[in-house]
Image (spheres, rainbow, N blue to C red):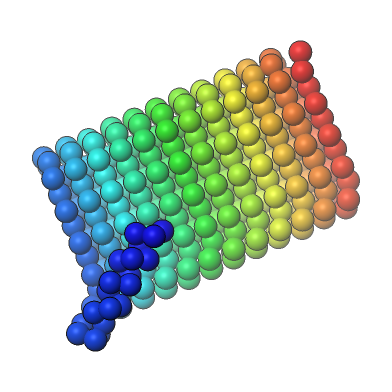
């Protein structure tokens, strides 16, 4: 985010000379790197740095004061940024082999940040609306993350450390929060939020754990914490101000929680 803001400030500083100018900076060091930048509008900013072999970056900006910063180090990394609107911000940092990132922003003041360090990680972020934020960090091999935000002031954070983890967050509404932390291998986390002020937190450590949250309504909170192997947690909340926390440790536990109404509380602890 700071890189994008700095770039926009530099461009605004020179606005007296180039009143309607977009700014694009591309630096390439290596072999067969590819960068494609298309800017339509006013005062858009794009910065691309590629160091290595056959990295590919595409930035498309339509609108006013959109900012994109893409850094690629390694080989065969791929980044695609599409921004339509005003004051959208995208940052992509890729270090490794064959990582892939896609960011699509339509609206005003949306922010997307992706960091990939490793091999074959994949991230996809789509934002429609106003001042949504998505942050994805992937460290390892073959992790996958997807974030779709429609509305206003939603926040989704994904951190994956390990091998073959999969995280999906879908937010429709306002002021929803989804946090997903995966450490290990083959863990899967799914969060779907429809409404306002819902809170979802999924923390997974181990192997082949599954956490699935569905929230429809207002002010619901769902937490799943898993430490072990092949634990499954399902939480469904329909209504307002429901609270559910499921904790699973060690092996092969399964939990289903369904809350319909208002002010319900569920606590589940499973261990063996």
Question: Horizontal and vertical percent for residue 106?
Answer: 45, 65
For the N terminus, the quadrant is: bottom left
The mark tally for this picture is 0
Query: Residue 91 vs residue 197: left or right?
Result: left
- Image vertical order of residue 53 relative to residue 170, above or below: above
For the C terminus, the quadrant is: top right
- Write down the quadrant of residue 84 in the picture: bottom left
Residue 217 vs residue 70, the one in the foreground:
70
Residue lying at 57% horizontally and 20% vertically, measured from the top left: 207
Question: Horizontal and vertical percent for residue 57?
Answer: 25, 50
Q: Is residue 40 visible?
A: no
Query: Residue 77 vs residue 129: left or right?
Result: left
- Image vertical order of residue 51 relative to residue 195, above or below: above
Question: Horizontal and vertical percent for residue 160?
Answer: 49, 34
Residue lying at 33% horizontally and 70% vertically, measured from the top left: 8
Question: Horizontal and vertical percent for residue 218?
Answer: 77, 58
Q: Is residue 227 visible?
A: yes
Residue lying at 82% horizontally and 55% vertically, measured from the top left: 240
Residue lying at 78% horizontally and 46% vertically, measured from the top left: 237
- The residue lying furthest to the left in this view is 31
Residue 4 vs residue 220, the one in the foreground:
4
């Amino acid at each position: 985010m700071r890189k994008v803001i700095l770039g926009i400030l530099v461009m605004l500083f020179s606005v007296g000379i180039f009143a309607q100018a977009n700014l694009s900076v591309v630096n390439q060091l290596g072999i067969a790197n590819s960068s494609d930048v298309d800017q339509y509008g006013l005062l858009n900013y794009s910065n691309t740095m590629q160091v290595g072999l056959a990295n590919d970056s595409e930035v498309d900006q339509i609108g006013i004061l959109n900012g994109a910063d893409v850094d690629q180090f390694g080989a065969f990394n791929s980044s695609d940024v599409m921004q339509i609107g005003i004051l959208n911000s995208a940052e992509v940092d890729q270090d490794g082999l064959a990582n892939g990132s896609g960011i699509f922003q339509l609206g005003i003041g949306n922010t997307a940040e992706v960091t990939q360090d490793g091999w074959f990680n994949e991230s996809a972020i789509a934002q429609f609306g106003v001042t949504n934020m998505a942050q994805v960090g992937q460290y390892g091999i073959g992790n996958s993350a997807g974030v779709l935000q429609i509305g206003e002031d939603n926040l989704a954070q994904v951190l994956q450390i390990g091998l073959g983890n999969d995280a999906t967050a879908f937010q429709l509404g306002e002021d929803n929060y989804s946090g997903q932390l995966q450490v290990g291998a083959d863990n899967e986390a799914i969060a779907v939020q429809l409404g306002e002020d819902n809170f979802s937190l999924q923390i997974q450590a181990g192997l082949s754990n599954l956490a699935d949250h569905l929230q429809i309504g207002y002010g619901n909170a769902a937490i799943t914490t898993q430490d072990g192997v092949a634990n499954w947690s399902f939480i469904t909340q329909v209504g307002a101000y429901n609270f559910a926390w499921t904790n699973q440790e060690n092996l092969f536990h399964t939990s289903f929680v369904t809350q319909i109404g208002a002010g319900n509380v569920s606590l589940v602890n499973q261990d063996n």
